[in-house]
Amino acid sequence: MKRTIATLAATCLAFATFAFSQEAQKTEKREAHDAGPAHVHPAQDAKAARPHSSANMTWHNGAIMTDAHAEAIFWGTSWPNYTGDKISGIDDWYAGFGGSTYAVTSDEYTGTNGQVGSSVAYSGHHIDGSAAPSSAPSTSTVLGEVCKVITNPVSNGYYAVYVDSKRGSAGYCAWHSYGSCGTVPVQIAFFFNLDGDAGCDPQDNVTGRSQGLSALANVSGHELSEARSDPRNGGWYDVRGNENGDKCAWTFGSSFLTFSNGSIWKIQGEWSNSHYSSGTGYPNSSGQPGCIDGGNYK
C-alpha cells in the first residue's frame, strides 16, 4: 500500500541514516542509507480506499525489476530453536515463485530498464537470533537489519525480513520499501508474525499449511509482486497510490495456485491493466474486473 493510509505512512516514512556499530561501519557497502517510504499491505479490517474512476495504474517514469535475487531473514529470539513449518515453508515458497504462472501476473509492466520478468532466484534464508522490534519498526530499522545480515547485497536484491513479533495495533500485515547498503541499492520487505491474526488470514483450507505460514505466503505474494512492478516509487500505481497488490488485496480467483516447484499456495491475485481493459480479470473488492492470479485467471 502507498500513500492511501496517511497515519500508517507517517509512521513508516523514515529517511534517517541507520547508525551502525564501528565494526559494520568499516565496510561501506553494509551501511544503510536513506530508507524509502513503506508501502503497506493493510489488514482486512483496515479502512479500504474508495474506488476511483481511473482504475488502471500508470507508470511514474522510473525503473522496474527485470529479475530479482531474493533472500529471507528470520529475525527474533524464537527463530534459532523454531520447529514449525514457517522457515522451511517460506524457503519452499520463494524457491517456487520464480517462473511460476503467478509470477507472470506482473510481467506486463515496463520501466526505464526494460520489462518485469518472472525470473526470481532464491539464495535461501538467514537467521538472526537477536531481539526483533516488539512494535511496528521504521523502514530505516529494517533496512539496517538487512545491511547487517546480507554481506554481499546486489542491486536487484529483494530482502524479506520476517520477525517473530505480532502486529498488535498496527493496521497492516506487511510492507515493502527500498534503500541502500553503502552504494548498493536494495529492495526490502517486512512481515509480522501472523499466527492467529484474523486480520491477515487468507482462510486457507486447501493447502495443508499452518495458518501462520499461509498468512505469510499470501502477503509475501502481495509484497514481492509490488516490489517487482514498483521497486523504488517510480514504477506502477494508480491515482490513489495503490500498487498492483493493493488493488486486488484479499481477493482470490483460484482456491490454490501451483508454483514452479510443484508447491501449492493460496495467494491473492494481482492487478492487470490489460485484463481490466479487456474485462477478462476477476473483480477486486470494488468490483473492478482487473485481477489475475496465474491459475483460473491468466
Image (cartoon, rainbow, N blue to C red):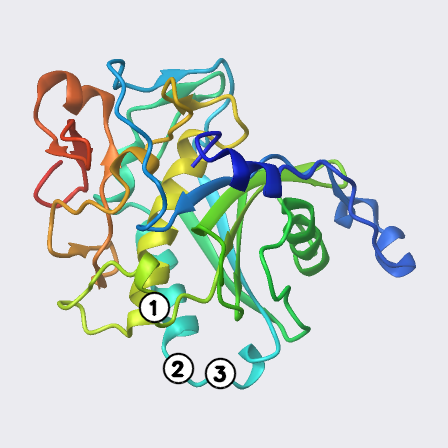
Q: Secondary structure at mark 2?
A: loop
Q: Can you tell which mark lies on residue 100?
A: none
First in residue order: circle 1 vs circle 2 = 2
Q: Position of residue 243 (x, y in %)?
A: 37, 30
Nearest the eye: 6 or 297: 6
Q: Is residue 109 left or right of residue 232?
A: left
Q: Position of residue 18 (x, y in %)?
A: 78, 47
Is the residue marked by circle 2 packed among few (<14), some (14-19), or many (20+) residues within 10 Å? few
Q: Which residue is mark 2?
A: 84
Q: Secondary structure at mark 1?
A: helix
Q: Position of residue 271 (x, y in %)?
A: 25, 31
Q: Which residue is mark 3?
A: 82
Q: Position of residue 206 (x, y in %)?
A: 13, 67
Q: What amino acid does circle 2 point to?
A: Gly
Q: Give the answer, above or below, for where 78 lies relative to 47.
A: below
Q: Is residue 32 left or right of residue 86?
A: right
Residues at discs 1 and 2 in contact (Cβ within 8 Å): yes
Q: Which residue is mark 1?
A: 213
Res 13 visible? yes
Q: Secondary structure at mark 3?
A: loop
Residues at discs 3 and 2 in contact (Cβ within 8 Å): yes
Q: Is residue 207 left or right of residue 296?
A: right
Residue at figure coordinates x 58%, y 55% from the top left:
136
